[in-house]
Image: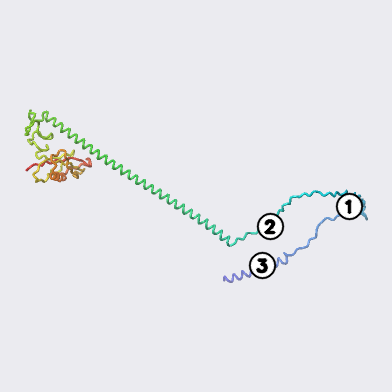
Amino acid sequence: MEEKNKRYGIIGTTVFHVMVLLLLIFFGLKSLPQEEEGILVNFGDTVLGQGEVEPKESQAPPVVKEATPPPPPVDKTPEPVVNEPAKEEIKTQDFEDAPVVKTEAQKKKEKEEKDRLEKERKQQEEQDRIEREKEIERQKELDRQRQIEAEKEAQRQKELAEQRAKEEAERKRKEEEERQAAEARNRVSGAFTGKGTGESTSEGETGGSGNQGYVTGDPNSRNRSGSGQGDSGSGFSLSGRSLVGKFPEPIDSSNKEGIVVIEITVDRNGYVFGAEFKLRGSTTQDRDLIAKAKEAAKRARFNADKNASAYQKGTITYHFVLD
């Protein structure tokens, strides 16, 4: 069906064009000659005249020729020759330039130049992209450095706060020691101003003058040696804290005597996590007794206090006696 329609279309188109061509041949290609048009003028022999009747002969007056005067004498002296500047010939062009036909070499050269410029443009874009990425990395590195510095500063502030807390705890401990020393001095003062049971100014067994014993002792006790903490001479000092359970006694069979003072460090939960020998108040530096005193002091347990200092210090005193 489609082939049949194409065939009918070709036949119809051909017939139409043939008819148009015939019409043009018979009617459109013919032209009629046209005569020249103008104005008919009267015959005559001059531009001047008068009358209504055409004369047989011309009545124009005869033309009188004037006599020609003789030519003047010719001066044969040669005239100077003047060299005129040569006129520059001006060339004009009445036709348009023919279009330039580019050769294959020119086309290749132009293409190479275009490719080179495109390559340079891409290289510049790549370089700009690399520079932008480097700048972003530099900015990130600066941010990391600032973060590190901020963390270090926060750590320094934390350490400084802890150091201040330790100093404050140490200050309070010293104040407490000074307070206890002041109380001891007051007790001594009271002892010598009427704390005793007699009116004598001397008491003891050594044969010298003075009141034999310790300023922290009991005036009613008959023990002349020890630390004033009781018959055993052992005790502890930890401000605001109380002992939990039994007082830890050292295991000793060395048959040595002496007083050993151990400085303890107690946390808020009441555990002893530090024990060091303290020379002040001790009467012996025997290594065996000091080691036994440290081991016993570490077994001590005190009451928990969440409001206490994180590192509270105190003392435990042991009195070693002969069997």
Q: Quadrant of the C terminus?
A: top left
Tag 2, which secondary structure? Answer: loop
Q: Where is residue 206 in the image (x, y as percent from the top left)?
A: 7, 34
Q: Can residue 123 be seen?
A: yes
Q: In which quarter of the image is the N terminus?
A: bottom right
Q: Where is residue 268 in the image (x, y as percent from the top left)?
A: 21, 43
Q: Residues within 10 Å of mark 2 (few under 14, many from 20)?
A: few
Disc ID at residue 46: 1
Q: As drawn, is 2 to the left or to the right of 39? A: left
Foreground mark, 3 or 2?
Answer: 2
Q: Can residue 245 be seen?
A: no
**Residue lying at 58% horizontally and 71% vertically, measured from the top left:** 3
Tag 1, which secondary structure? Answer: loop
The amino acid marked with disc number 1 is Thr
Upstream in the sequence, badge 1 or badge 2?
A: 1
Q: Where is residue 44 in the image (x, y as percent from the top left)?
A: 89, 54
Q: As drawn, is 310 to the left or to the right of 212? A: right
Gap between marks 3 and 2, in whole Å? 39 Å
Q: Label 3, on which residue?
A: 17
**Residue lying at 88% horizontally and 52% vertically, measured from the top left:** 46
Q: Label 2, on which residue?
A: 95
The amino acid marked with disc number 2 is Phe
